Image (tube, rainbow, N blue to C red):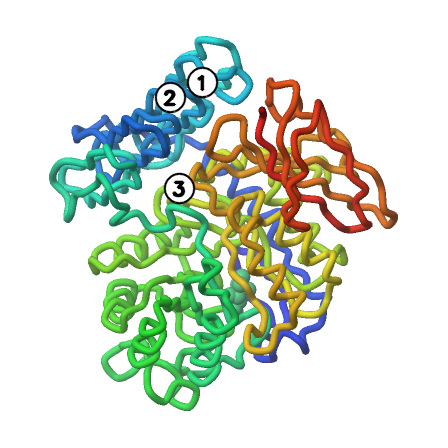
Amino acid sequence: MTFQQDGILHHRQSRLAPHATRAPTREWLFRGVLLGCFAGWALGCSNAAPASGGTGGAQTTGGTATGGVATGGVATGGSASTATGGSAAGGVAAGGSSGTPPVVGGNTTGGTATGGTPAGGSASTASGGAAGAAQAGGSAAGGAPQATGGTNSGGVTSSSGSAAGGRATGGAATGGIVTGGTGGPSSTGGASGGNTSSGGTTAPGMLAATPPMGWNSWNKFGGGVTDTLVRGIADAMVSSGMQAAGYQYINIDDMWQASSRDSSGNIAPSASKFPSGIKALADYVHGKGLKLGLYSDRGTKTCAGLPGSYSYETKDAQTYASWGVDYLKYDNCSPAAGSNIQTDYTNMANALKATGRPILFSICAWWFYNWETSIGQMWRTGTDITDTWDTDSHSFISLLNNNGGWSSRYSNASYGSPGLAQYAGPGHWNDPDMLEVGNGGMTDTEYQSHFSLWAIMAAPLIAGNDVRSMNAATKNILTNADVIAVDQDPLGTQGKPISTSTTLEVWSKKLSGTQTYAVVLFNRTTASADITVTWASLGITSASATARDLWSHTDLGSIATQYKATVPSHGVVMLKVVGD
Ligand code: GLA
């Protein structure tokens, strides 16, 4: 199959067959194009004036404070032991102030973002406004330097983009959508204007406060998705313990649709695959305490050639909402002539918001674009994964490098640079694509690595296997509570490689809690090898730290200075480390 994307012809194989029959050699030729697009957002548009609004939830007893959602407002992060600043469109986003770092500055579209103001705390773990990153049309200033040391990496300034209305996390809105934060018991939510405003003791509104967890049909079943399959998977998600482990969304990917819209232009499911319709299926899934996801495309056709949502965004969003859909994956095939990728995705984001139903928006544009962070809860950072270790650009290793930061493998240093991690946080996540764990193309050791590295990158954990028949090894990987806790840590930091070796690697992720880190020791080589992590390299200032092995589920006790482990070929050792 070939398709057109941004003027370039791409070749791909048909997705009509289930995954198992797909050839492993398909290659998409979009990287060069996407790099061009990536550079494109640096071109200038004007900034918007900051708009007025309220102030986000302020938490006084520690924990994580994340405020609400504002359009054209002012978002200010909470005051807490950890605070995440706002994300404001057409407004001002500022990081919180904090007694204990880290504080993360805001993301803004068309406004200004100011990093946080950490006051004291341990030097090594704080950066003064490190994430005061400007989105399209914004400007950003780094936060105030940290009182007791550390680094102030400042903000990123961009003059690109336009100041479209959007949302802010951490604030209140005038005339916008406000959802309450995930603040602790003493937090207070946003104030005025929007559809709803609440905060305080619960987390009523934020979508994807931690990386979404669920299942998707594509990797294993391709076009073979049916009502019977989805009901069976939903049953198995409960009986296998996947739901109890945190998996929530049951996502139907491409090829659920009828080949054409109905006479009124409504999108409809294939009558043979979904004879009871999607609403009945959603009711069934909801009855299990799970949520239902669907798939569409910003172009005239989906990647499998079925009707896309271009120019039908409002109609389709309303249809999804009426069916009880909770999640939309939105693909990037068959763009309409003259259309604009940002406009197309924004149109659907706005249409979903306008329904009033919280529908998670999963952007599948196969690359990171700066504007994605203000309209979606997650966005793909690369091409489609296949169930292979390191065969080609679709293999696990390639997707990992792209999302995780080993830019040295690419000629252009901005490709999948470590900087992607700055865009991850509560409500917005980098998505290196779905899991292949259990699909048979890799060893269990390799699947452990896949799962561990997705978790330390705070990636969405969307299983792609046949949950109805998974073996014990697959189930143990997918339901490892210690590893899932790393992925779901409320701080929402994306971990990064911190070693200089690119074959025997140390990855680190700051977790909530003082001097608390997740560590992955990752052996890319074909022989087992020793890998050492020093506490100092993590930012731990104590002479000793208490460690737990997250795969053997063993407490290792208090250990001085460093930890050395023998790591199998293609395997990991994963730890949680707390400075004493
Ligand atoms: C694209 C996406 C995949 C999948 C298919 C469906 O390739 O990137 O994740 O949704 O389309 O056709």
The answer to whether the residues at label 1 and label 2 have Cβ atoms under 8 Å apart is yes
- The three-letter amino acid code for the residue at tag 2 is Gly
- The three-letter amino acid code for the residue at tag 3 is Pro
Q: Residue drawn at (57%, 33%), measured in percent from left and top?
A: 517
The N terminus sits in image quarter: bottom right
Residue behind mark 3: 426
Residue behind mark 1: 128
Q: Residue drawn at (71%, 37%), measured in percent from left and top?
A: 411
Residue 185 locus on image (x, y percent): 25, 36
Q: Which picture quadrant has residue 98? A: top left
Question: Residue 189 vs residue 509: left or right?
Answer: left
Question: Residue 69 vs residue 435: left or right?
Answer: left
Q: CA distance from mark 3 to mark 1?
A: 19 Å
The label shown at residue 207 is none
The C terminus sits in image quarter: top right
Q: Residue drawn at (60%, 80%), measured in percent from left and top?
A: 17
Residue behind mark 2: 116
* Secondary structure type for disc 1: loop
Q: Of marks 1 and 2, which one's residue comes earlier in the chain?
A: 2
For residue 159, say whether it is visible: no
For residue 44, say whether it is visible: yes
Q: Of marks 3 and 1, which one's residue comes earlier in the chain?
A: 1
Q: Which picture quadrant has residue 301? A: bottom left
Q: Of marks 3 and 2, which one's residue comes earlier in the chain?
A: 2
Judge whether 375 appears above or below 547 on screen.
below
Question: Residue 1 vs residue 528: left or right?
Answer: left
